Amino acid sequence: AQSVTQPDIHITVSEGASLELRCNYSYGATPYLFWYVQSPGQGLQLLLKYFSGDTLVQGIKGFEAEFKRSQSSFNLRKPSVHWSDAAEYFCAVGAGIDYKLSFGAGTTVTVRA
Amino acid sequence: NAGVTQTPKFQVLKTGQSMTLQCAQDMNHNSMYWYRQDPGMGLRLIYYSASEGTTDKGEVPNGYNVSRLNKREFSLRLESAAPSQTSVYFCASSDSEMIYEQYFGPGTRLTVT
């Protein structure tokens, strides 16, 4: 069965420090990979996506993610965090043609001054 | 463009009551989706509509019905609400060329007492 794991439930980071959020997936087929961000009380906003090609992808708000097939991972990074990055982040994976986008449980990021 | 819109934003129901959640998109997308979000579980697919005139069950369809009214609108109905349906409901849409790149509405927070 396909699954998406975000090992860290909650991460606290200082403003200006770097951030890395982990995502591992279990899929038989070549996956489509996404990161979404959800600010409190808001919907999900697409940060970035990976379909094929260059394994390092750039997204909005200064985020990037790296696809590592050998590790079945798609980790999200940001070099310098801003207070406005406090939110919940979801990794999502799709494969095949079943229309089902599978989500991880999410990682909540707290930014301290 | 408004993107994906949902009404209402908040709703409180008593057990056994019924209601319909409305969703509309103005991106000319063929596919639309309903998810529910529960703490620690990410998002789970309830129903989806691959194209106008079709609907299919997702991961957690029990207790729900859907209607794809036209290309723009996709509604979710709870016929007899139960406390277990207390959740945040998100509608999403995607283009048929990339079904997994889904764009989300702001959500409906539903409480069933």
Image (tube, rainbow, N blue to C red):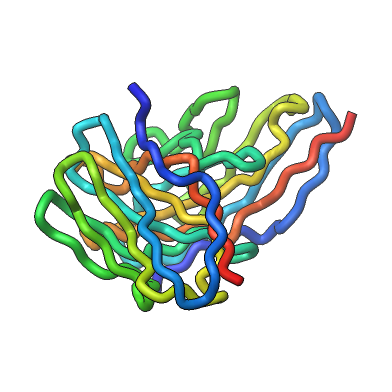
Name the side, left or right, on which B34 lies relative to B32.
right
> Where residue A20 appears, x then y in whole percent?
68, 41
Viewer can see residue A76: yes
> Where residue B80 appears, x then y in whole percent?
41, 76
Q: Nearer the viewer, residue B38 or B22?
A: B22
Furthest residue toward right? A113
> Where residue B17 appears, x then y in whole percent?
45, 71
Task: Name the residue: 62% across, 51% down.
Answer: A22
The C terminus of chain B appears in which quarter of the rendering?
bottom right
Residue A77: quarter of image? top right
Name the side, left or right, on which B100 lies relative to B89.
left
Residue B78: quarter of image? bottom left
Task: Name the residue: 33% across, 59% down.
Answer: B76
Location of residue A69 with respect to B7 vertically, above or below: below
Location of residue B33 with respect to B16 vertically, above or below: above
> Where residue B50 appears, x then y in whole percent?
18, 54
Q: Nearer the viewer, residue B55 or A2?
A: B55
Q: Nearer the viewer, residue B8 or A113?
A: B8
What is the total number of numbered labels drawn onto the structure image? Answer: 0
Task: Name the residue: 47% across, 60% down.
Answer: B36
Q: Nearer the viewer, residue A83 or A40?
A: A40
Viewer can see residue A72: no
Task: Name the residue: 36% across, 36% down.
Answer: B4
The N terminus of chain B appears in which quarter of the rendering?
top left
Location of residue B3 with respect to A12 vertically, above or below: above
Name the side, left or right, on which A20 lies relative to B88.
right
